[in-house]
Image (cartoon, helix red, strand yellow):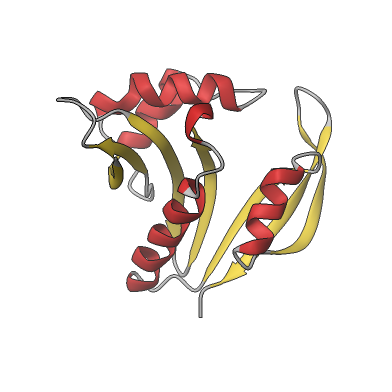
Amino acid sequence: MHWNLSGLFLCDIEQVLAIEEVSFKAPWSRTLFLEELVCKDASDYVVKLTGSEKHEPVIAYICSRIIGCEMSILRIAVSPEWRNLGIASWLLDKCFKMTREKGVTSVLLEVRDSNRAAIALYGKLGFIPIGKRTAYYSETGEDAVVLMKKLT
């Protein structure tokens, strides 16, 4: 089986919500994802499994904003049964290539200070820590590490 990248559409929301629920301590609501569909600065994609059956299930997604020459990653998640197979790296690499074509020169994101797996992944992809947001996550009071990657 293989996977492919496509834009986020209304028909994908249920599957994205299911991944969101098992991936985050404070998952986004349906309303937030629906707002993504109409946001002019949104750059949102899903990864779908191909060659499995008639319908191609969503196995990962990314929600980001592109403003000027900067991309901010708001959400990225892979379905638990598809983790550790390189899908997140593949998804990010595809997004970086597409955003370079739009003139993006840097990518920013925040990640929980305790999320060592994500921080390691981002480090392998060339992200560097540039700051910390104290008590950024309101549900736990946890700090966020701010990471940046230059695309040029």
Pick out the residue farthest to the bottom: 152
Instruction: Name above or below for residue 56 compared with residue 98.
Output: above
Q: Position of residue 2 (x, y in %)?
A: 29, 44
Q: Quadrant of residue 106?
A: bottom right
Q: Quadrant of residue 141?
A: top right
Q: Quadrant of residue 55?
A: top left
At x 45% / y 27%, what residue is drawn? Answer: 32
Quadrant where the N terminus sits is top left
Q: Closer to the camera, 23 or 73? A: 23
Q: Is residue 79 left or right of residue 128?
A: left
Q: Position of residue 67 (x, y in %)?
A: 45, 60
Q: Position of residue 81 (x, y in %)?
A: 50, 28
At x 37% / y 44%, what residue is drawn? Answer: 44
Pick out the residue farthest to the left: 54
Q: Position of residue 51 (x, y in %)?
A: 21, 36
At x 46% / y 47%, what residue is drawn? Answer: 87
Instruction: Name above or below for residue 35 compared with residue 122.
Output: above
Number of marks in the rendered image: 0
Q: Is residue 126 left or right of residue 46?
A: right
At x 44% / y 66%, what residue is drawn? Answer: 68
Instruction: Name above or below for residue 27 compared with residue 43.
Output: above
Pick out the residue farthest to the front: 1
Q: Closer to the camera, 6 or 64? A: 6
Q: Is residue 124 left or right of residue 135?
A: left
Q: Is residue 106 left or right of residue 3?
A: right
Q: Closer to the camera, 126 or 31? A: 126
